[in-house]
Amino acid sequence: MSYADKVLIENLRDILKNGVWDTDMDVRPRWEDGSPAHTIKKFAMVNRYDLSKEFPIITLRRTYLKSATDELLWIWQKKSNNIKDLNSRIWDSWADETGSIGKAYGYQLGVKHRYPEGEFDQVDRVIYDLKNNPASRRILTNIYNHHDLSEMRLYPCAYSVTFNVAGNKLSAILNQRSQDMLVANNWNVCQYAVLVHMLAQVCSLEPGELVHVVADAHIYDRHIPLVEKLLEAEPYPAPKFELEDNVDDFYKFTKDSVSLTDYRYHDFNVKIPVAV
């Protein structure tokens, strides 16, 4: 099985066996019919993926890598907060009538600040430091800006990435305050694995580790039968990941810059309800 399958299976089983229910609490998320969307959860799950060995995509069901990459580039490359710049409908429930999600995600990464070396937004500062100050322990992004939370349609879930160079390898820690484990776990893991590969390539580095830290790792009540069905599948080996190797500018990557060879996955043809 792929290593990502192994990790997800262990996480899901741990939550189902040892998690804590929030049914005695007044929760914000609601199902489409207005019912409260309760969860069973574990606090502070930490997973490590060695990107030099294997790309961390699951085979228990399909993760749509190009769509995940498209959303990643919408945030990190386009620095957009408008769903009209995104080639999928995944943010529709949180957008206003103009398509905006407020001062969230891409908006935060695109705000420029002045440094001694010049003016940078968060993404360009990361790239500058990876190229010019790789020994720095200050290479990170943070989009959980308390000044702007009231103007965000959804508070950021994946809110901070810390980059670190050791030898010639680029590693990163992705911090998330909350994660819907069935819907979003591997989606986010694949996105930030792609980001590490992209930044490593344009900064003349090699991909190292991705460490994923989730504060509130949860399974929604109506997802439990689907999770149990997912856990019945026999995983396949991991596919081979390829990144367009002639790109030396982060802003020239597209969703088609990524590809998988020999990606086998189980059909999971069920509609997964999403709590909003």
Image (cartoon, rainbow, N blue to C red):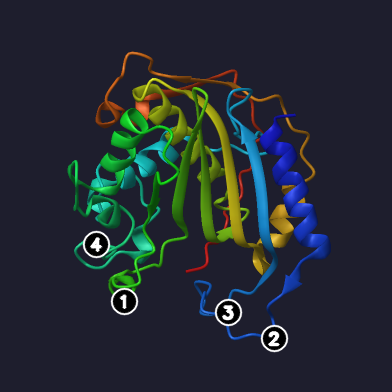
Residue 13 location in percent, x, y? 79, 53
Q: Between tags 3 and 1, which lies in front?
A: 1
Report how far apart the C-alphas of labels 1 and 4 lie in the structure. Answer: 14 Å
Numbered disc 1: secondary structure: helix
What amino acid type is highlighted by mark number 4? Ser
Upstream in sequence: badge 2 or badge 4: 2
Q: Residues within 10 Å of mark 2 (few under 14, many from 20)?
A: few
Residue found at x 23% / y 51% = 110
Q: Which residue has dot 4 on it?
A: 100
Report how far apart the C-alphas of labels 3 and 2 lie in the structure.
11 Å
The answer to whether residue 52 is left or right of residue 142 is right
Per the image, the residue denoted by label 3 is: 36
Q: Is residue 95 left or right of residue 34?
A: left
The amino acid sitting under disc 2 is Asp
Residue identified by numbered label 1: 150
- CA gap between label 4 and label 3 equals 26 Å
Residue at label 2?
24
Measure the C-alpha gap from mark 1 to mark 2.
27 Å
Instruction: Indicate the secondary structure of the residue bearing disc 4.
Output: loop
Front-lying residue, 236 or 153: 153
Residue at 34 percent across and 56 percent down: it is 105
Residue 91: quarter of image: bottom left
Real-space CA distance between mark 2 and mark 4, rounded to the nearest whole angstrom: 34 Å
Relative height, residue 237 to residue 143 (above, below): above
- Does residue 148 appear anywhere in the picture? yes
How far apart marks 3 and 1 lie (CA) works out to 23 Å
Q: Quadrant of residue 189?
A: top right
